[in-house]
Image (cartoon, grey):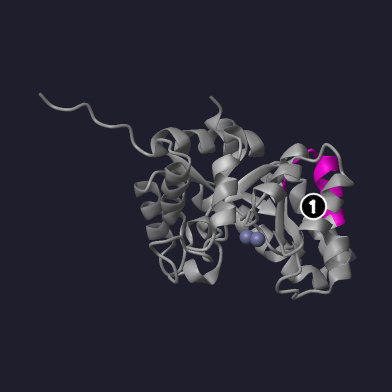
Amino acid sequence: MSQPASPALRLFDSHCHVFREEFDGDFDDTLARAHGAGVEGMIVVGTTAATSRTALDLAASKGTGAVRLFGTAGLHPHEAAGFHDDEAAKIRELCEREDCVAVGETGLDWFKEWAPREAQLASFRWHLSLARELDKPVIIHSRDAHEDTLALVREFPGVRGVMHCFVMGEAEMEPYLECGLSISFSGIVTFKGSQLNQAAARACPEERLLVETDAPFLAPIPHRGQRNEPAFCSDTLRFVAGLRQDDPVRLGASTLQNTARLFGLAEYAI
Ligand SMILES: [Zn+2]
Ligand SMILES: [Zn+2]
């Protein structure tokens, strides 16, 4: 007697930057490998007005096949020195497009601090306001800036969105959950030494849990040090499922639905 085929892994990479030059040589193969790993869709996240336009164009031109792509528009905190009226007007125009599924990424990065703090704070506040005005989710990057990030999020009650590449612990996660935000775990959760982050991944309510690659950065174990790509999202998902003593197929389908619900992707609605 033959065994019934086991259901296949299905998941969604909730945050990647596949428009970057790291993928110039093998973009179609990258999509094919993602498809082979069960990745049904990706949120392609803009980091400047220019790359946001590229992300939206890529989603329109390459993202309608087996792996669906959805673009966003925003100014990354590393780029916040370029936050001025002209850039903001361009980002607003892109965010208003119907095919733009989120505002961001935005946020605060006190770890690298590549842009002045005042500029990062002004840019982040502007994105939060825009997200609430347009009723679109906001994608938040926060590194070594928990208290300031939380203070700004609390200035905008009702804002929807996700703490992307969440690297903090359970205690820090709680207030973001209270604010209504979802939590997206990246390859960092798989690293040795990420025990606090692993505890957060164990404790996160399932309906708020997302997974991402942040490709091309931060490849999960066993690919650490390589260029990251959306196919590797399945390694992070399996790892998180292991932490939660859950079935990866079941958890993958759940995170896919969470991503679809957050970003309003009617294609995946159940
Ligand atoms: Zn980020
Ligand atoms: Zn990113």
- Asked where in the image residue 104 lies, by quadrant, the reply is bottom right
Q: Ligand 1: give its quadrant.
A: bottom right
Find out if the beta carbon at label 1 lies less than 8 Å from the nearest ligand 2 atom.
Answer: no
Residue 133 located left or right of residue 29 = right
Instruction: Name the magenta segment's main secondary structure.
Output: helix
Residue 266 located left or right of residue 78 = left
Q: Residue at x 43, y 38 (%)?
A: 245
Residue 220 located left or right of residue 197 = left
Q: Residue at x 45, y 68 (%)?
A: 227
Q: Nearer the viewer, residue 244 or 10?
A: 244
Q: Secondary structure at mark 1?
A: helix
Q: Position of residue 16 (x, y in %)?
A: 56, 57
Figure check: 122 above or below 179: below
Residue 254 located left or right of residue 249 = right
Q: Is residue 74 visible?
A: no
Q: In the rendered view of the protein, which quadrant contains the N terminus? A: top left
Q: Nearer the viewer, residue 172 or 138?
A: 172
Magenta residues span 125-138
Q: Is residue 255 visible?
A: yes
- Asked where in the image residue 123 lies, by quadrant, the reply is bottom right
Q: Which residue is mark 1?
A: 93
Q: Position of residue 270 (x, y in %)?
A: 53, 24
